[in-house]
Image: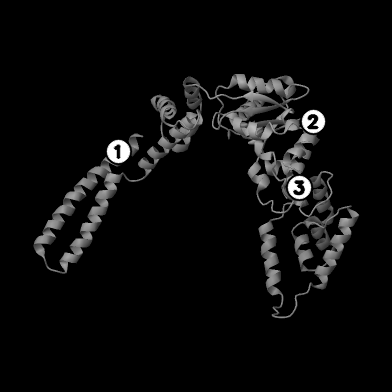
Amino acid sequence: MGANPDIIAKANGSILQSLPKVSGGNIHLSNNAQKSIAESISISKKMKDDFVSIEHLILGILKGSDNTSQLLKDNGFNTKDVMAIIKSLRNGQHVTSANQEETYNALNKYAINLNERAETGKLDPVIGRDDEIRRVLQILTRRTKNNPILIGEPGVGKTAIAEGIAHRIIRGDVPENLKDKLIFSLDMGALIAGAKYKGEFEERLKAVVKEVVSEDGRIVLFIDEIHTLVGAGGGQGAMDAANILKPALARGELRAVGATTLDEYQKYFEQDKALERRFQKVTIDEPNNEDAISILRGIKEKYENHHKVQIKDEAIIASVELSKRYITERFLPDKAIDLMDEAASKLRMEINSKPEELDEVERKIMQLEIEREAIKRENDNQKEKAIKKEIANLSEIKSSLLAKWEAEKKSR
């Protein structure tokens, strides 16, 4: 509506400050507050809602004539515009729970639009994995069982395949019936965050599924770590998250791409046969050294821009070969990318901060200067001269190191 919430909050604070301060006794609602609440209850009934929510309260306040009502009106609020915004926001929904606001615009709140991120250059380029991406696209074009599940070890690039599909859709490099698709990645952190009441997590997930279903197959939902949904939120009689997905998957209304490890798939998915048969397995193997080197070459520019250093091809090859040899508990390309990132970060820190050698000399000079001041009070001229000479020598070394460091910074 164009209103500035900070201005409204500040003005409302001034209204509260102007009220008489009374200590002790019971706190009672003012007549105006009681009228606004009564009006909001009446409005919620007219709108066929089960609970009174924030929008009802705003409409109730606007019906009044007190300072708060006038404040909202002065900042551009009116009943007609507020009602229009509520209808647009609700998209035909009614308030059926105490946390209904959590379910509005659920897809934008609890999922990330990968197409949008690919278009704005916020996703890293996806190098290789063409066979796997083609297989996923083939499954997505099927009439039934068109939900791929990517199975592979952590760090082999399962998430990158979903990002690769988003890149391809933006370029138009997909079958005709997939060109209008939007890839949304379910943000499990946002979905769980703050869901403290019984059933709140399930309500959020239901709202996401409802929005995806309402788009008639235009949205493909990518669910990383999909095994976390099996049994999630199912405590104290609430519905298991996987059971929320099953009906929409069975009817073909929800199209999803899952990702999990082989261990987690066997532990959780294979136990739930009804859910397992809705998905088609796509195995994502660890890339070989040559493919991993190609992947690092493709993304090195992003790391060069971030760290403001040049990454040579020898460093890329060494990252892959050394990580393969020495980091045995992890997988390519993730461990090689981490090694390259770590090395670039260390180099950048060395460029930006003083070299250790220079820092030691400066601290030694500072220590000697403190010592010299102490000796001055003792009138020990011989010792003072020796310290002065040492400070002079160290100052020369400091100047030399400083010049060398400045020259190195300019050459990079």
- Whole-angstrom CA distance, mark 3 to mark 2, is 21 Å
Whether residue 275 is situated above or below residue 131 in the rendered picture: below
> Quarter-wise, where is residue 158 in the image?
top right
Can residue 291 be seen here? The reply is yes
Where is residue 220? Give x, y as percent: 71, 31
- Whole-angstrom CA distance, mark 1 to mark 3, is 65 Å
Report the quarter where the C terminus lies. Answer: top left
For marks 3 and 2, give the one nearer the viewer. Answer: 3
> Quarter-wise, where is residue 382 in the image?
bottom left
- The residue identified by callout 1 is 407
Which residue is located at x 76 percent, y 56 percent?
76
> Which circle marks residue 250 in the picture?
2
Where is residue 344? Give x, y as percent: 42, 35
Label 3: how many residues lie within 10 Å, few (<14), some (14-19) or many (20+)?
A: some
Whether residue 87 is situated above or below residue 10 in the rendered picture: above
- The residue identified by callout 3 is 238
Where is residue 364? Give x, y as percent: 23, 53
Q: Nearer the viewer, residue 331 or 163?
A: 331
Amino acid type at mark 3: Ala
> Is 25 on the left or on the right of 342, as rendered?
right
